[in-house]
Amino acid sequence: MGPKRTQEAERRINIGSQFQSELPDLQDPARLEEEEEGASLVWKPWGDVETNPETQEKVRNLLHLASAKGGPGGRVNAELALHCLHEAQGDVLEAAEMLRAGPPRRPESHPLADYHYTGSDTWTPVEEQLFKEAFYLHKKNFRLIQKQIQTKSVSQCVEYYYTWKKKTRFGCTRPRLKQKKRPRRPDEEEEVEKLLGE
């Protein structure tokens, strides 16, 4: 055993101006917006959305519509819905129409021109099945999962896993997969073989 500590550190509260931090002057938010170069506003609550419960309900319905699998444009997401709502200047019906039209085509100069919305990749049933089979074999080794799927990138496989793991519970063992496995149609079998290069 080491030597016992005979003196305990003295505890005290530091009082005085030398112990106080100096706060900068409050800056005018309007001036800050002017100073920010390269930043683009992609969402702002328009009109009475912050104060009117009826408008808030319409926005909630729009967000629900955006996340519904059978909704317009397939399964998009809340982020895209809010961006559409911003571009429609708060008009919920116009934003819903923009979602129905599918992913927006924006000019290259637009700040969201090359933006990737999480969960916006489409996966075929065959790719989903290949993912599940690879996941049971390789767990979270997404590089090996991607090699088995071949039509998706590693980042798409990671995104697929984390986006849908709450909605689709992957079983923990291989036997559960085999119990749930449905027989493939002949055209699916050919597509799987083509993807796997067999």
Image (spheres, grey):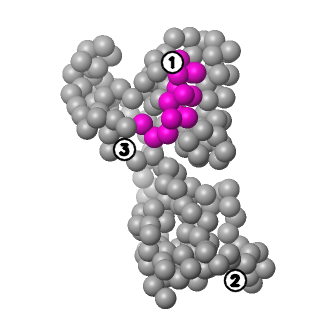
Where on the picture, by quarter, is residue 64? top right
* Secondary element at tag 1: loop
Amino acid type assigned to the residue bearing label 3 in the image: Tyr
Type of the residue with mark 1: Gly
User: Does residue 67 appear left or right of residue 111 in this picture?
Assistant: right
**Most foreground residue, 6 or 78:** 78
User: Which residue occupies 55% across, 69% down?
Assistant: 127
Secondary structure under tag 3 reads: loop
Q: Disc 3 marks which residue? A: 115
Cα–Cα span, label 2 and label 3: 37 Å
Determine whether, in the image, residue 147 is placed left or right of residue 94: left
Q: Does residue 21 lie above or below 198 as drawn?
A: above
Residue at left offset 66%, top offset 57%: 166
- In x, y percent, where is residue 85? 50, 25
Q: Quadrant of residue 55?
A: top right
Residue type at tag 2? Arg
Q: Is residue 155 above or below residue 144?
A: above
Q: CA distance from mark 2 to mark 1?
A: 49 Å
Judging by the rendered image, the residue that carries numbered circle 1 is 90
- Circle nearer the N terminus (2, 3): 3
Please report whichever mark, 2 or 1, sits nearer to the chain's N-terminal start: 1
Relative to 118, say whether 129 is above or below: below
Horizontal and vertical percent for residue 192?
A: 55, 78
Q: Residue at x 46, y 40 (%)?
A: 103
Using the image, tell me which numbered label, if any, was put on residue 174: 2
Residue drawn at (28%, 25%) of the image: 22
Q: CA distance from mark 3 to mark 1?
A: 21 Å
Which residues, given as a range, are shown in magenta?
A: 91-104
Asked if 155 appears above or below 31 in the picture, the reply is: below
Q: Rate crowding at label 3 as few (under 14), some (14 to 19) or many (20 or more) other CA atoms within 10 Å.
A: few
